[in-house]
Amino acid sequence: MTSSPKAFDLDFINEVQRESEQNLALCYQCGNCTAGCPVSFAYDYPVNQIMRLVQAGRKQEALSSHAIWLCSSCETCTTRCPNDIDVARVMDVLRHMARRENIVSEKAVGAFWKAFLESVEKHGRVFELGLMANYVSKTGRMFTDVDLAPMALRKGKLGLKAHDIKKIAEIRGIFDRYREQKQ
């Protein structure tokens, strides 16, 4: 039996609460999180409505939202919450859950995230030029911010060569353990 996208999913609520370590029942929809969010203008659902979707067990709608991918993780929502809910952490958990289920509503953001993690796994830190080359290859956005490269190079902010950290094997081990847990 397949469930409709609007079906109540108690397991989803419990999973979000467990992973975020937040009691979502404490959210009474005051709207302070949304009022303070600097990027809510770009969201399909304001932050408080994302919280409500989770409370209502509307997994498909919550994980398919653009808002969870556009969230800048500035934590203004968390700071403004009168019930001390770490709303930014909930948004982060939703993004991780969506990624695990291959639901990425903002393809460019998902591509950047993947390129970032690949760079960290390979070098133990971010190699900016490699990250951007990887991102461009994933998205085809060849000329996005290309005008910023000369200035970044002049200021020494964009290295031409990757510098691996000394204990790279430890970082790669973290990625290996993640993949093992995922299976």
Image (cartoon, rainbow, N blue to C red):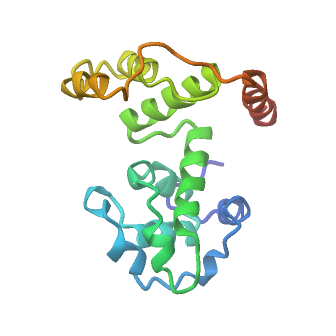
Q: Does residue 5 appear anywhere in the picture?
A: no
Position of 94 with respect to 77 (left or right) is: right
Q: State the image quarter where residue 118 is shown.
A: top right
Q: Position of residue 9 (x, y in %)?
A: 64, 62
Relative horizontal placement of residue 51, taking residue 150 as reference (left or right): right
Between 109 and 147, the residue placed more toward the observer is 147
- Identified at 66% across, 49% down, the residue is 1
Task: From the top left corner, tell me how far across and down residue 18 is, in percent.
Answer: 74, 63
Say if 55 sits above or below 67 in the image: below
Q: Residue at x 58, y 61 (%)?
A: 89
- The reply, left or right, for residue 2 in relation to residue 111 is right
Which residue in the rendered view is the most extreme toward the front?
155
Q: Residue at x 43, y 48 (%)?
A: 69
Vertical arrangement, residue 22 with respect to residue 32, above or below: above
Is residue 77 at all visible to an observer of this figure? yes
Front-lying residue, 171 or 9: 171
Residue 71, horizontal then vertical, whole percent: 41, 55
Is 3 placed above or below 181 here?
A: below
Furthest toward the left, the residue is: 147
Q: Quadrant of residue 20?
A: bottom right
- Total numbered circles: 0
Query: Of residues 147 and 7, which is closer to you in this image?
Result: 147
Task: Please provide percent x and percent y for residue 39.
Answer: 31, 59
Q: Nearer the viewer, residue 138 or 4?
A: 138
173 in relation to 41, above or below: above
Locate residue 14: give its quadrant: bottom right
User: Which image quadrant: the C terminus?
Assistant: top right
